[in-house]
Image (spheres, rainbow, N blue to C red):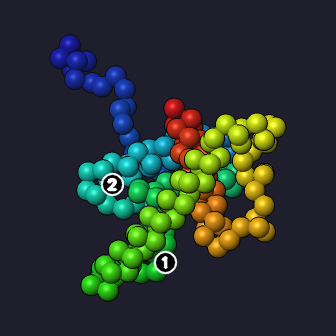
């Protein structure tokens, strides 16, 4: 009798749960938050361990969009939509020329950022954001492309920071 008591489990342990929609809305939102964090962690591990390019887009029950991508969700989705999964010689030439073009755009963007980070612009802002003072109508093609890239980078940085705050 004493031996039998030692063998009996005190808890049920980890059990399989039935996969069905959670009825209570608040519980559903909490579960989404926790599971999203776990999903992002697993995707990050997959990309780190295997070198895989991973993109996740999830919509919360409150209809908020969340994305994760390594190296970048936008580039992975663009590659997927353009069917660039296998690279031929022409593809590599295209990627090289594209990388050079991107390098040129980044240099232009860096010049713009450096220009805006100078003290003369700080006094011009009067509590506004840098994008409020830009006149898009007066920009040339290259300058406009750099402006769009800067806004995308800002969006990416905000998303990364928001995810850091949400995931703890």
Q: Residue at x 22, y 18 (%)?
A: 6
Q: Residue at x 62, y 42 (%)?
A: 117
Numbered-mark total: 2
Q: Which residue is mark 1?
A: 81
User: Residue shown at 22%/23% (left/top)?
Assistant: 7
Q: Residues within 10 Å of mark 1 (few under 14, many from 20)?
A: few
Front residue of 103 and 118: 118
Image coordinates of residue 41 in percent, x first then y, are 41, 45
Which label was assigned to residue 47? 2
Q: Secondary structure at mark 1?
A: helix
Rendered view: 81 above or below 107 = below
In this view, which residue lies farthest toward the bottom? 90
Query: Residue 141: x and y, percent?
Result: 64, 73
First reached walking from the N terminus: tag 2 or tag 1: 2
For mark 2, does the 10 Å Cα neighbourhood hold few (<14), some (14 to 19), or many (20 or more) residues?
some
Q: Is residue 121 left or right of residue 83?
A: right
Q: Position of residue 98 (x, y in %)?
A: 42, 74
Pick the front one: 1 or 24: 24
- The answer to whether residue 121 is visible is yes
- Residue furthest out toward the left: 3
- Cα–Cα span, label 2 and label 1: 20 Å
Viewer-nearest residue: 157 or 36: 157
x and y percentages locating residue 112 in the rendered image: 61, 54
């Amino acid at each position: 009798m004493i031996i039998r008591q030692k063998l009996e489990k005190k808890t049920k342990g980890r059990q399989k749960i039935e996969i069905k929609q959670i009825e209570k809305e608040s519980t559903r939102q909490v579960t989404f938050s926790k599971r999203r964090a776990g999903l992002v962690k697993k995707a990050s591990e997959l990309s780190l361990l295997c070198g895989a390019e991973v993109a996740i887009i999830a919509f919360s029950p409150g209809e908020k969009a969340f994305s994760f991508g390594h190296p970048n969700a936008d580039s992975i989705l663009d590659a997927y939509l353009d069917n660039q999964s296998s690279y031929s010689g022409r593809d590599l030439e295209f990627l090289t020329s594209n990388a050079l073009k991107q390098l040129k755009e980044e240099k232009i963007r860096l010049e713009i950022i450096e220009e805006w980070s100078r003290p003369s612009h700080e006094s011009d802002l009067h509590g506004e954001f840098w994008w409020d003072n830009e006149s898009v109508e007066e920009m040339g093609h290259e300058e406009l492309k750099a402006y769009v890239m800067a806004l995308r980078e800002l969006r990416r940085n905000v998303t990364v920071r928001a995810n850091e705050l949400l995931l703890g």
